[in-house]
Image (spheres, rainbow, N blue to C red):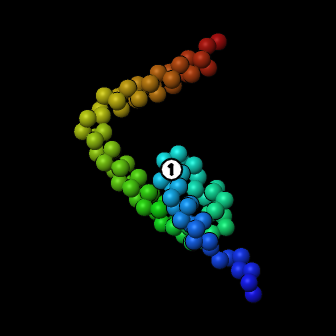
Amino acid sequence: MTTEHTQPDPQACHEFQDQLPELIGSGQPLGDHPHVQTCENCRALIRDLETIAEAARQLLQTEESEQEESSGDGLWERIDSAIKAEEGASAKGSQRE
Ligand SMILES: [Zn+2]
């Protein structure tokens, strides 16, 4: 048995992992990369990275919403009045007869 098609190529993995920061920075879906589709090693690596990224995102969201509570009242009021204005406009539109 010399054809082990599941055997990852360490050189390809190294090149792929070299490109990882660029791929993440470009916002491309990492799972679409041809190397990932053939390499279980790097698939697992990306799963780990995505778990970390997701945790970081939730952490950021928590911080952002805390900041909004203390300083974003004006912003929420603007959004709220914009929604009400839109509701009023559509209500007027349907009642216009
Ligand atoms: Zn790999």
Q: Residue furthest top?
A: 97
- What is the secondary structure assignment of the residue under circle 1? helix
- Percent position of residue 55, x then y: 40, 59
Residue that appears at 30% across and 39% down: 68
Where is the N terminus found, in terms of image quarters? bottom right
Q: Give above or below for 68 relative to 81.
A: below
- Between 60 and 81, the one lying in front of the other is 60
Can residue 85 be seen from the camera position used here?
Answer: yes
Where is the C terminus found, in terms of image quarters? top right
- Between 81 and 74, the one lying in front of the other is 74
- Percent position of residue 78, x then y: 38, 26
Q: Please give the residue where the numbered disc 1 appears in the rendered image.
A: 22
Q: Please tell me in which quadrant of the rendered image residue 66 appears.
A: top left
Q: Give above or below for 17 relative to 96.
A: below
- Percent position of residue 86, x then y: 51, 23
- Percent position of residue 8, x then y: 62, 73
Q: Is residue 55 left or right of residue 34?
A: left
Residue that appears at 30% across and 34% down: 72
Q: Residue furthest front?
A: 11
Q: Is mark 1 within 8 Å of ligand 1?
A: no
Q: Residue furthest left?
A: 70
Q: Residues within 10 Å of mark 1 (few under 14, many from 20)?
A: few
Q: Amino acid type of disc 1?
A: Glu
Q: Please tell me in which quadrant of the rendered image residue 5 appears.
A: bottom right
Q: Is residue 32 left or right of residue 48?
A: right
Counting every numbered tag in the picture gives 1
Q: Is residue 76 left or right of residue 8?
A: left
Can residue 43 be seen from the camera position used here?
Answer: no
Residue that appears at 52% across and 61% down: 17
- Between 92 and 3, the one lying in front of the other is 3
